[in-house]
Amino acid sequence: MRFEHFRISLLPTIQMSLFEDRSEMSREEWIRKAFASSYVFANRSIFYHYVPHPADSPTLISGRIGRSKTSVESTPPEQGLADVDREAWHSITLLIDPTEHGDGQKLIIECDKAVGNPSAILKGFCDEINNSGQAPLNYSIHIAPIADPETFWGFVRENEGDVTLVSFELIAPNMFGVASEFDAEMKALQAYEGAEKARFEIQSSNGLNLDTERVQETVAYSLRGGGEIVAKTRSKRVYRSKNKVRSTISSVSKREFKEMRISQKIKYLIGLFR
């Protein structure tokens, strides 16, 4: 089994300042309330169902996302081996750490081709949470992949002097704190311009110098779950951070995992957050 890692960002909705007093509901409380409900949402014309698990952990949230698939099977020989359509459900587990700390508000999700691409599924899920009215209206939720910065810097080293474009799409900060001038600028964009995301790119036909503090901070911000990066070279090589999602391989088989009780599953999955 393989699990991919994502970061949850909560952004104040329109007409609500980032600096308003939100003591009535913390981000952690918002996430807990949002993921306590069941949802039905669509992605690429496929309908998915999210079902929350009972609260078996005092800190973590868990649930499953599933879809149905119809396959053609045959009846037994005594019934003529006739074709018959049978519906089956395929589902994956997700686990969320909603707490606010240096590496908190993280989500891990099981990968299963029978269910679909985790990034695409989570995007459709977030859209439904934001638009359904089931979650409190003071925040909107955004989920971005977590990737190892070395995947980007390795690409830069392999193509030294040949990288001509780097594009960043960044989510305004929600819980990282102000660790640098860049973080402060992103926080100000959200607070004063009401920006949920910022997109910019740097390019040079002669090749970019990426060994700068500004680029290093932006890459670090993006790949800890604050956005996505696309880089291109003169020779048409492309780096996409959304294809470099950090993943963890489980030593437990899918069958063994399914046979566990929910409390056992959560206990096992906690170790995958590290």
Image: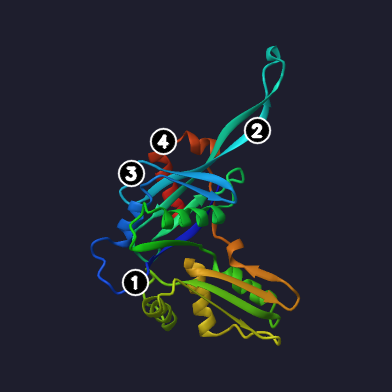
Q: Name the residue under label 2.
A: 71
Q: Residue at x 54, y 66 (%)?
A: 148
Q: Name the residue under label 4.
A: 261
Dot 1: what SS? loop
Q: Foreground: 169 or 145?
A: 169
Report, in whole angstroms, how far the alpha carbon at label 4 lies from the one at label 1.
44 Å
In the drawing, what numbered circle is on residue 55? 3
Report, in whole angstroms, how far the alpha carbon at label 3 lies from the one at label 1.
33 Å
Q: Residue at x 36, y 63 (%)?
A: 139
Disc 3 or disc 1, which is closer to the eye? 1
- The type of residue carrying mark 1 is Gln
Query: How many marks overall?
Result: 4
Specify which label sits upstream in the sequence, 4 or 1. 1
Estimate how packed mark 3 is, as few (under 14), some (14 to 19) or many (20 or more) residues with alpha carbons within 10 Å.
some
- The type of residue carrying mark 2 is Ser
Residue 106 shown left or right of residue 29 in the figure: right
Q: Name the residue under label 1.
A: 15
Report, in whole angstroms, how far the alpha carbon at label 4 lies from the one at label 2.
29 Å
Report, in whole angstroms, how far the alpha carbon at label 2 lies from the one at label 3.
34 Å
Estimate how packed mark 1 is, as few (under 14), some (14 to 19) or many (20 or more) residues with alpha carbons within 10 Å.
few
- The type of residue carrying mark 3 is Ala
